[in-house]
Amino acid sequence: MTDRWRQLAYLSLAELGAFSLWFSASAVLPALTREWSLGDGGRAGLTLAVQLGFIVGTLVSAIGNLPDIWSPRRLMAASALVGALANAALALWVDTLTPALVLRFVTGAAMAGAYPPAMKIMATWFREGRGLAIGILVGALTVGSATPHLIRGATAVHWRVTLLVASGLALLAAVLVMAIVREGPHRFPSARFDARMALAVFRERGARLACFGYFGHMWELYAMWAWIGVFLAESFAHAGTPLNPATATFVVIGTGALGCYAAGAGADRWGRTTLTMAAMAVSGACAALIGLTFAAAPALTLAIAIVWGISVIADSAQFSTAITELSPPAYVGTALTTQTCVGFSITLISIWLIPLAVRAVGWRWAFAFLAIGPVLGVIAMGRLRALPEARRMAGGRR
């Protein structure tokens, strides 16, 4: 195994561990709902607090050019450590909603330093095959995000133990990054502080359209990840099936790693716009259709959910890879962070709207409005495909 593939393996393991923090509270939401008497607002708040923290963290990071003027390796390790400590504090000492929201916010802010820097590090190891490499990295992130659901579904441990296990994985991630991970031979040029570069990604026509495609993708992704577990639990309960909804949720989200791998290889071979448009078409169709199976056919519900889980994340890495190819080289980290910041800001709206949609139209149609994002994303990537800038991606493959 060559150095670059070893580094990909180490960095992917670190990303898996760090992002086990993301949905650790969401995975134990049924237990918290019972113990803390949470309503819809409190349940949504525990997810939204992480998203909001991540947004604030990426905003500060982008304005400060942190991934470009600081060592991305040290930034990633420090962020994983802070996230692990905040999550552990929630597990060990918190018994009410308000401090939990504060600590989930801190956890989200810490994750802002664990994601874009990891993509930048990976890009220094790969020029050819970059889409596959970042796809594998995002696949590891996907499995990490799903891991708390597996812990809850496969064991009978208390919710606090689930959170502590996630914190332990994040702590190991920080150690791994500092001890083994390093930047590759294709380092980006040195950068100096320039707050204006936080918005530079929107000045370039090609990068701007890649961002718009990503925003459509993000409208759907985190709302699906945040609420698919609740949807499956209620659907299975109404259908009277013995299927375990927590384990099913892990399978649905975790199999997205397969989509990331396949999409990364496909995008490097056939083009980023081709791949992203195809993935969004499939995921948008799943969003529109899955509610029609609610409480009716558990096997069909799970099958569509798995296809959705694979397709909804498959294109994510390719939007980020496109930014590394279309942005000013010295500020790639800043561009990735700005793209991520705006994308996650959009998720606040769609995550918040799902419970409102459930009350208004029921689970049968609640997910359908998420299909709006993929539709707009396909339009944006179709426009990018027609531009000369598209030739700068994937070795000239559109």
Image (tube, rainbow, N blue to C red):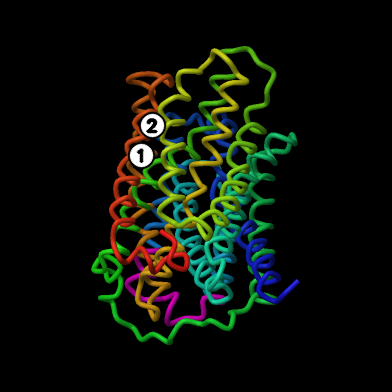
- The Cα atoms of the two marked residues, 1 and 2, are separated by 6 Å
Q: Amino acid at mark 2?
A: Ile
Indicate the secondary structure of the residue bearing disc 2. helix
Indicate the secondary structure of the residue bearing disc 1. helix
Residue 77 location, x and y as percent? Answer: 59, 71
Stretch in magenta: 58-74
**Is residue 29 among what the camera can see?**
yes
> CB under 8 Å between callouts 1 and 2?
yes
Q: Residue at x 44, y 43 (%)?
A: 278
Whether the magenta-drawn stretch holds residue 50 is answered as: no
Q: Quadrant of residue 176?
A: bottom right
Residue 98 location, x and y as percent? Answer: 44, 45
Q: Which mark is residue 354?
A: 2
Q: Residue at x 54, y 53 (%)?
A: 266
Of residues 88 and 3, the one nearer the viewer is: 3
| 280 displayed left or right of 264 | left
Q: Amino acid at mark 1?
A: Ser
| Location of mark 1 (residue) | 350
Judged by its main secondary structure, the magenta piece is: helix
